[in-house]
């Protein structure tokens, strides 16, 4: 990039990741260091994804941002942090003039934003990656590592959207957070039969944001103190189930961890309710299906919202989908949606 250029733009898409071992709680809020490791599956870009274009120009008089067509303030601590950190981290490789140019950010999600479908994770992963590309980071290991670290400046779980397939975010032990980053446990090709089914129960913005919710949990929940003591074992068991492609174990652990997340939310004071009656009906249906087959064939997981993500194997999709559609017929005005693919290109 040369200083004479008046305009330069980079566009990137980042897929959503849905955790099977949940991140909930920070030991360091400023550095976004989690209280436990987490593990997620990255969805295919054709399904749920964020798309972000970032442009710099010496003609821009200020940083500006649009999300889903509406202008948003860039003066939030997180956006400022991402811009500041990205510029700082990349300052070795660029001249000052270029880094001081203002940016325009245009981002859109092809799914409900802030409805507990990991929109901020995909959005921030996209933003950091686009900024890094824009400022000319080459794809070297050290740069990618820096990218992952700066990614965590925006949203903790964003770092898991950097990889496809099955991705762990190791909590790390160091105070500066330099050992807290995402690693790929297995690529998508390792378990190509894995499918996800997203049931949009409600696409409204959630009442209690994750950042605020998890902070209150850490401050008030006794159950959370127990949760952090079992998470290493749970991560090990989940990693092993994925490596062995053991769906019944994968599914049971996924459901247990989702249930514990929502139990911890209920144990928060005042309590946080993300699931609705419909969410609980989905849980009952999944257990009824698994009872019929006397084996875990399908697993649910819920994030900070009422929408269900079901994991299942390709061979079981037709049966499960027809049962789900029978009990929860898609209503056009509510916009319930089913997503069955899972193909995960690398970002
Ligand atoms: C997860 N969630 O592991 C869990 C499950 C929500 C429930 O990661 O405060 O938006 O920005 O680090 O990353 C949502 O948390 O929170 C989340 P911050 P983030 O996917």
Image: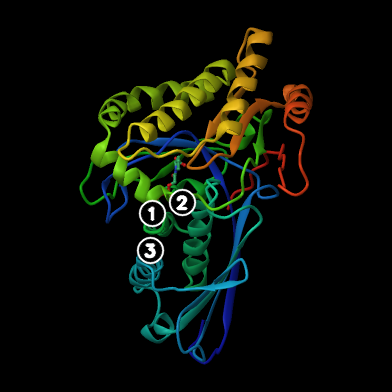
Whether the residue carrying mark 3 lies under 8 Å from ligand 1 is answered with yes
Chain-order first, disc 2 or disc 3: 3
- Residue 344 as seen in the image, left or right of residue 274: right
Q: Are marks 1 and 3 in contact (CB under 8 Å)?
A: no
Q: Is residue 59 visible?
A: yes
Return the mark for residue 158: 2
Looking at the image, which residue sits at the far top?
A: 294
Q: Residue at x 72, y 32 (%)?
A: 328
Q: Are marks 1 and 2 in contact (CB under 8 Å)?
A: yes
Instruction: Say few, some or many: other residues with alpha carbon within 10 Å of mark 2 (under 14 / 14 to 19 / 20 or more).
Output: many
Q: In the image, is residue 341 above or below residue 125?
A: above
For mark 3, what is the residue? 78
Badge 2 element: helix
Which image quadrant for residue 108? bottom right
For mark 1, what is the residue? 152
Whether the residue carrying mark 1 lies under 8 Å from ligand 1 is answered with yes
Badge 1 element: loop
Q: In the image, is residue 308 above or below residue 26?
A: above
Badge 3 element: helix
Instruction: Say few, some or many: other residues with alpha carbon within 10 Å of mark 1 (under 14 / 14 to 19 / 20 or more).
Output: many
Cα distance between the residues tagged 1 and 3: 10 Å
Judged by depth in the image, the label closer to the viewer, 2 or 3, is 3
Q: Residue at x 58, y 24 (%)?
A: 283
Q: Residue at x 61, y 49 (%)?
A: 203
- Residue 178 as seen in the image, left or right of residue 346: left
Q: Nearer the viewer, residue 157 or 206?
A: 206
The picture places residue 320, in percent across and down from the top left corner, at 73, 24
The picture places residue 140, in percent across and down from the top left corner, at 45, 58
Q: In the image, is residue 189 above or below residue 287?
A: below
């Amino acid at each position: 990039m040369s200083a004479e250029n008046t305009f330069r733009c980079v566009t990137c898409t980042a897929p959503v990741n849905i955790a099977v071992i949940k991140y909930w709680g920070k030991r360091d809020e400023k550095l976004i260091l989690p209280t436990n490791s987490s593990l997620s599956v990255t969805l295919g870009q054709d399904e749920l994804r964020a798309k972000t274009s970032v442009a710099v120009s010496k003609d821009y008089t200020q940083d500006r941002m649009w999300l889903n067509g509406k202008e948003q303030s860039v003066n939030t601590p997180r956006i400022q942090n991402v811009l500041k950190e990205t510029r700082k981290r990349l300052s070795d490789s660029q001249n000052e003039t270029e880094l001081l140019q203002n940016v325009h950010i245009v981002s859109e999600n092809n799914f409900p934003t802030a409805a507990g479908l990991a929109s901020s994770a995909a959005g921030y992963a996209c933003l950091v990656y686009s900024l890094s590309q824009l400022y000319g980071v080459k794809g070297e290991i050290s740069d990618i590592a820096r990218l992952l670290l700066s990614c965590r400046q925006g949203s903790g779980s964003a770092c898991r959207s950097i990889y496809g397939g099955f991705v762990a975010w190791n909590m790390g032990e160091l105070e500066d957070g330099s050992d807290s980053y995402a690693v790929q446990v297995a690529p998508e090709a390792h378990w190509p039969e894995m499918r996800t089914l997203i049931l949009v129960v409600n696409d409204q913005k959630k009442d209690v944001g994750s950042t605020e919710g998890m902070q209150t949990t850490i401050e008030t929940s006794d159950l959370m103190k127990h949760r952090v003591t079992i998470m290493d074992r749970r991560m090990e068991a989940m990693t092993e189930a994925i490596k062995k492609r053991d769906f019944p174990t994968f599914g049971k652990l996924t459901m247990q961890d989702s249930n514990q997340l929502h139990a911890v939310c209920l144990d928060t004071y005042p309590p946080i309710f993300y699931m609705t009656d419909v969410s609980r009906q989905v849980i009952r249906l999944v257990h009824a299906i698994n009872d019929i087959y006397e084996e875990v064939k399908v697993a649910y997981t819920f994030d900070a919202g009422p929408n269900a993500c079901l994991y299942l194997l390709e061979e079981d999709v037709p049966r499960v989908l027809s049962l789900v559609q029978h009990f929860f017929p898609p209503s056009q005005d509510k916009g319930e949606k089913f997503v069955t693919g899972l193909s995960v290109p690398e970002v």
